[in-house]
Image (cartoon, rainbow, N blue to C red):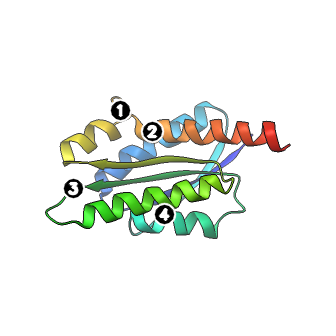
Amino acid sequence: MAHLLIVEARFYDHLNDLLVEGAKAAIEAAGHTHETITVPGALEVPGAIALAAESETFDALGVVIRGETYHFEIVAGESARGIMQLTMDGLPIGNGILTTENEAQALTRAKPTEGDKGGGAANAALAMLALKDRFLA
């Protein structure tokens, strides 16, 4: 049984609730346990994972919606780059940080009954943990 740390960028409460709901359902359906920590935004997710690197596996969740400035590109790109770097360093992480053009796209992807990206990220984290266990055990 694995224990997943859900690291949630709690910026859009209603969208994050859906992502976390999907993640928890997927984790529990697979017979694993979880806990959730929150950070202010997507840029803080990689740092929180790095600080908690002793945890078994991670599910990174959040929503970044395009606005009127270049800030979207920085937040989306740098949070993804940070998560990818941690993955390359051997941490099993499922990336469920949505990067969308608008709230409607985010809602469709976040709903467990539609896109279920929270559940998908949890399943990806578990798959990466299985690979880590297979090759590094």
- Mark 1 and mark 4 lie on one chain; the one further toward the N terminus is 4
Local crowd at mark 4 within 10 Å, few (<14), some, or many (≥20)? many
Q: Position of residue 109 (x, y in %)?
A: 32, 38
- Mark 3 and mark 2 lie on one chain; the one further toward the N terminus is 2
Q: Position of residue 91 (x, y in %)?
A: 66, 53
**Residues at discs 4 and 3 in contact (Cβ within 8 Å):** no
- Mark 4 and mark 3 lie on one chain; the one further toward the N terminus is 4
For the point 38% across and 58% down, which residue is it? 77
Can you tell which of label 2 and label 4 is closer to the viewer?
Answer: 4
Q: Amino acid at mark 4?
A: Val
Q: Amino acid at mark 1?
A: Gly
For the point 62% across and 70% down, which residue is it? 51
Residue on which the image places disc 3: 66
Local crowd at mark 1 within 10 Å, few (<14), some, or many (≥20)? some
Q: Amino acid at mark 2?
A: Gly
Q: Position of residue 76 (x, y in %)?
A: 35, 58
Residue on which the image places disc 4: 45
- Tell me the element at label 2: helix
